[in-house]
Image (spheres, helix red, strand yellow):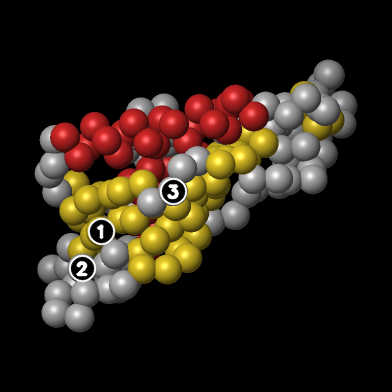
Amino acid sequence: MSALKYPTSPLVARAWLALVPGITAAMTGTTLPRIPADSLPAWVTTGFLTVQTVGGSPSIDTMEASPVVSVKCWAVNAGQPGTGAQVAIQTKIPWSRSEELAEAVRHAIYSMQRAPQQRRLTLPVAGYAPASVLSAYMLSEPRPFPDPTGYACHQFDMQVNWIPVVP
């Protein structure tokens, strides 16, 4: 039996986002999955959220991490006209769907702030110890992020304060 690895800020952010109603761990990652030429992945209908640590300051006295995480909420209009047909990205960019994902996160943050409690998370990748999120805060307004590929993307920054749960 091997020891569990320590949690990372991107994994904790992904697990926290999966607590938001309508968002699952399968809808989160550090990179946006490609759409294969011959099939539509499930995230095309749900949207996808990518996370990247962009700053923050860890505590010097405790194991508390306080990363600033950039969250991008992605949506795309893609279709496959028939079985075995090539997937096509449509020209109408679904800005409202990516914005709705960002707003779902904003409202979850505010609702969790009104009922604060430590949330123990199981991380979305096997082999990592769990973490407890102490709090999460929006640091910037969701804003459209230009993407030349026909995808809609809204980006915002949030801070997630968390501690590892180690035996």
> Relative to the observer, which residue lies in front, 123 or 91?
91
Give the side of residue 37 with respect to residue 159, left or right.
Answer: right
What's the residue at 41%, 30% (across, down)? 104
Position of residue 56 relative to residue 98, above or below, is below
Q: Name which quarter of the figure residue 17 lies in.
A: top left
Residue 73's tag is none
Place of residue 105 in the rendered image (x, y in percent of width and height, measured from the top left): 39, 36
Position of residue 2 relative to residue 35, above or below, is below
Give the side of residue 82 with respect to residue 23, left or right.
Answer: right
Q: Amino acid at mark 1?
A: Asn
Mark 1 = which residue?
161
Give the side of residue 165 with respect to residue 92, left or right.
Answer: left
- Label 1 residue SS: strand
What crowding class fits label 1: few (fewer than 14 Cα within 10 Å), some (14-19), or many (20 or more)? Answer: many
What is the residue that sits farthest to the top in this orientation?
Answer: 82
Position of residue 167 relative to residue 161, above or below, is below
- Of the residues under marks 3 and 1, which one precedes in the sequence? 3
Place of residue 101 in the rendered image (x, y in percent of width and height, measured from the top left): 49, 32
Residue 41 seen in the current view: no
Residue 2 seen in the current view: yes
What's the residue at 58%, 26% (across, down)? 97
Mark 3 = which residue?
140
What's the residue at 73%, 46% (across, down)? 147
Q: Amino acid at mark 2?
A: Glu
User: Which marked residue is nearer to the observer: mark 3 or mark 1?
Assistant: 3
Image quadrant containing the C terminus: bottom left
Mark 2 = which residue?
64
Place of residue 150 in the rendered image (x, y in percent of width and height, measured from the top left): 77, 37
Position of residue 6 relative to residue 26, above or below, is below
